Amino acid sequence: MKAFERRDLIINELYRHKKVHVADLAQKFQVSEETIRRDLDKLDKEGLAKKNYGGAILNAHTNEDPSYASRHQINLEAKGIIAANVLDLINDGDSLMTDTSTTAFEALRKITEAKQNLTIITNSLAVLSEFQHSGHKLISTGGTLGPETSSFVGPTASQSIQKYNVDVALFSCKALSMTGGLSDSNEEESELKILMQKQASKVVLLVDHSKFDRIAFIKLFSFDKVDYIVTDQKPSEEWIAFLNTYQVSVLYSSEI
């Protein structure tokens, strides 16, 4: 078993049981306790777990959803780089579906300025408010509005998404794992992202470098459903090779 596979399985154990023990994991994976301690050290530094005597516990904040306003301030430079890199994937006249991620919001800033005659379908109140005078056609999914997330969710939103076939689905997620695929923390939002992926001819995932080698609570889908990953930094060679096996094109830095 490779180190990243063991790491993902440890994370799964943390989510399932909220805590893990070094001795148990060492026996389970047939490795030394020192190897497990190094694994837990990395998870502690990444904020996924908190080490304690004999093992670790799941970080209580791992699956919390911060408000839209607070998310908007995180990794702004990376979001700007990603936004610039996505332009060549969008054509004049395209129909888009976008989620409530702040990365997609920043991408739309660039896209709506550079492209003409777009149709944008979204469950994001922030997108509807910001781009209502952009000259493009906006369609709201409707649904139940979450005050903290500024997003519409629920059956109405789901039904609206399934009414449309679009050129591009443009969204983000909380985590990428070679063994766990794409994952997120909000169940209602995750359901809508899965539907958006199904309704799109081209699926574009927008994620900064911090999302790689992580697992969140809700599984979305595997990499065979993704056409492009747009990020701010070149992923590791291991990731590049892995994504090539799924025929996922990776765009990063200023390279398109």
Image (cartoon, rainbow, N blue to C red):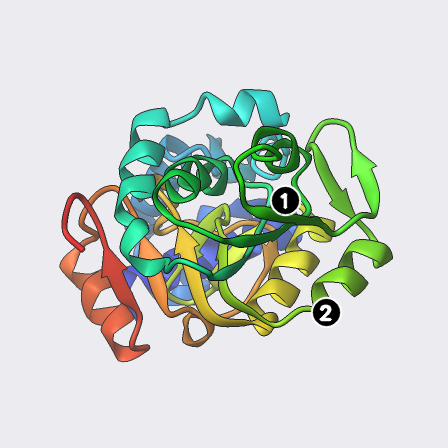
Q: Counting other residues with Cα less than 10 Å from the Cα at mark 1, is it few (<14), some (14-19), or many (20 or more)?
A: some
As helix, strand or loop, the secondary structure at mark 1 comes to loop
Between 44 and 249, the one nearer to me in the picture:
249
Residue with the mark numbered 1: 18
Tell me, yes or no, whether the two marked residues, 1 and 2, touch with CB atoms within 8 Å: no
Q: Quadrant of residue 126?
A: top right
Return the x and y of residue 128 as percentages of the image width and height. Answer: 65, 37
Residue 232 vs residue 40: left or right? left
Residue 41 vs residue 141: left or right? left
Return the x and y of residue 224 as percentages of the image width and height. Answer: 42, 76
From this viewpoint, is residue 24 visible?
no
Disc on res. 152: none
Q: Quadrant of residue 80?
A: top left
Residue 253 vs residue 82: left or right? left
Residue with the mark numbered 2: 162
Label 1, label 2: how many angstroms apart (C-alpha)? 36 Å
Return the x and y of residue 121 as percentages of the image width and height. Answer: 63, 53
In this rendering, is residue 224 above or below 126? below
Q: Amino acid at mark 2?
A: Gln
As helix, strand or loop, the secondary structure at mark 2 comes to helix
